[in-house]
Amino acid sequence: MNVANLQLEGLLMAVAAINRLLVQKGVLTAEEIDVALRKTEASETNQERSEGMSASSRDAVNFPIRLLELANQCQPEADMPSFSKLARMVGKIKEPYNDQL
């Protein structure tokens, strides 16, 4: 596997852990994090940003956002799922983009 991919995996899991800690400490709510991630995903998939971008490129841009969204939905008292489990979940819930309907 490419070392850069492993570094990104580590970074995403670190951000997920930090998000969880922010919620546990009462700095942010899970809902506030969810809104921020959804806004980010929306801005990354808007027509201006994604014009001329293939569906696979849009998926690549949105993958880390979606993974963090799923990690954010995990119960705080439960163990964080592994990167590979979260990645599989992202693949299962992915919906087609408007121009793919």
Image (cartoon, rainbow, N blue to C red):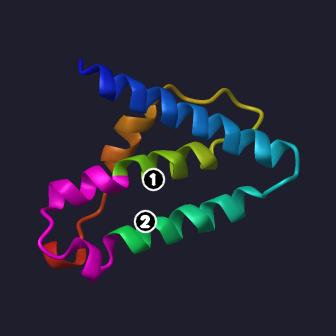
Whether residue 59 appears in magenta in the rendering, the answer is: yes
The answer to whether any part of residue 75 appears in the image is no
Placement of 98 over or under 59, stated as above or below: below
The overriding secondary structure of the stretch rendered in magenta is: helix
Reading the image, the residue beneath label 2 is 41
* Image quadrant where residue 19 sits: top right
Q: Could you tell me which secondary element the residue under label 1 belongs to?
A: helix
Q: Position of residue 13 (x, y in %)?
A: 54, 32
Do labels 1 and 2 touch, CB within 8 Å? Answer: yes
Reading the image, the residue beneath label 1 is 65
What is the C-alpha distance between the residues marked 1 and 2? 6 Å
Direction from residue 92 to residue 1 in the image, left or right: left
- In magenta, the rendered stretch is 45-62
Whether residue 98 appears in magenta in the rendering, the answer is: no
Q: Could you tell me which secondary element the residue under label 2 belongs to?
A: helix
Q: Residues within 10 Å of mark 1 (few under 14, many from 20)?
A: many
The kind of residue tagged 2 is Glu
